[in-house]
Image: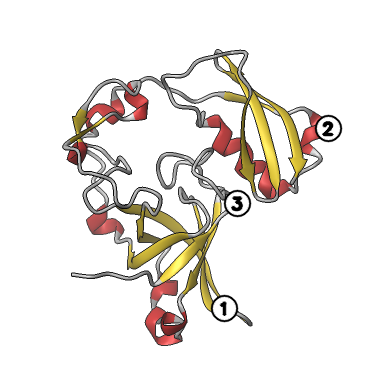
Amino acid sequence: MEIKPIGYINTPFPTKFGLPRQGGVCKSIPATLVFEPEFRVAEALRGLERYSHVWIIWGFSENTGKDFSPTVRPPRLGGNTRVGVFATRSSFRPNSLALSCLKLEGIEKTADTGYVLKLSGADMKSGTPVYDIKPYLPHIDAFPNALGGFSTEIEDYTKSVVIPSELKEKLPPHLLECLTEALSQDPRPSYIDDGDRVYGFPFDKYEVRFKVEGKILTVTEIFEV
C-alpha cells in the first residue's frame, strides 16, 4: 500500500529540538494543518466541527530510510536502556508513522490555502506530513484505568522555567505561553545533565537559548533571526 500526505502541519518549531515528546502534553502549542490542493474541499470536512479533538496520523519525515531495529533507547529511560520498539512511541519505527490526539480549535477558510484546521497541543515540527485525520471518540477512545507501562514509572523531568522580564517582552503573549510550556518539559536528552552548557533552538522567528541547573531552567537569550 502506498500512502501520500493529505497536508502539512505548521507550528512555531522549525526543528525537532524543543518539541514536547507527546501530543497534548503542552496544550498551548498551536498548529495549522494546510491541505494539499486535491483535499481542500468542504465536503471532506463536513461534520468535523462537531468534535473537540482529532487523531492526526503523521510521519516522522526526518527518520525515513533508516534500518529497522527491534529495540530502541527511549530518552526518558536515560537513553541507555533498550526496550522493544513496539512498546514505545519512538520515532525510529518500521514505517515512520506517528499518532497524536490534538484539540480541534476550529476550521477556517483562507484565501490562499482554502480550508485549514486550527489545532492545539501539537508535538510536530513545521513541514510535518499528515496522512489522515480521524475524530476522537471519548466514549470509545478513553480508557481511564488503562496501564501506562514504564511511562508511569519514570522520573519526573519537568522543570521550573525562569524567563527574565526583559526577555519576556520580546515575545507576544501567546508565544510566551507556548514557549514556557514547552521548556517546562525539558527538551534536552535525559542522559545529558550539564549545568554550564547553553542549549538553543529556533522558535517561530526567534532563537531561544537556555541553561538548566537542577530543577530550574533559565532562559538566557531570545533574539530574532
Q: Would you call the spot at circle 2 few (<14 residues within 10 Å), some (14-19), or many (20 or more)?
A: few
Q: Which tag is nearer the camera, tag 1 or tag 2?
A: 1
Query: In the rendered image, is residue 146 in sight?
Result: no
Secondary structure beneath disc 2? helix
* Residue 75 to residue 173: above or below: above
Give the total number of marks visible in the rendering: 3
* Residue 93 to residue 189: above or below: below
**Is 55 positioned to the left or the right of 107 in the image?**
left
**Is 188 positioned to the left or the right of 22 in the image?**
right
Q: Amino acid at mark 2?
A: Glu
Q: Which residue is mark 3?
A: 12
Q: How is the image coloured?
A: secondary structure
Determine the image quadrant of residue 10. Answer: bottom right
Q: Earlier in the sequence, mark 1 or mark 3?
A: 3
Q: Which residue is mark 2?
A: 166
Q: Are marks 1 and 3 in contact (CB under 8 Å)?
A: no
Q: Earlier in the sequence, mark 1 or mark 2?
A: 1
Residue at x 69%, y 40% (from the top left corner): 207
Which residue is more in the foreground, 52 or 180?
Answer: 180
* Residue 76 to residue 139: above or below: above
Secondary structure beneath disc 1? loop
For the residues marked 1 and 2, what is the alpha-carbon distance in whole angstroms? 37 Å
Q: Which residue is mark 1?
A: 113
Query: In the rendered image, is residue 106 in sight?
Result: yes
The picture places residue 128, in percent across and down from the top left corner, at 45, 58
**Is 132 positioned to the left or the right of 29 in the image?**
left
For the residues marked 1 and 3, what is the alpha-carbon distance in whole angstroms? 19 Å
Residue at x 61%, y 18% (from the top left corner): 197
Which residue is more in the foreground, 26 or 221?
Answer: 221
Q: Amino acid at mark 3?
A: Pro
Q: Amino acid at mark 1?
A: Thr
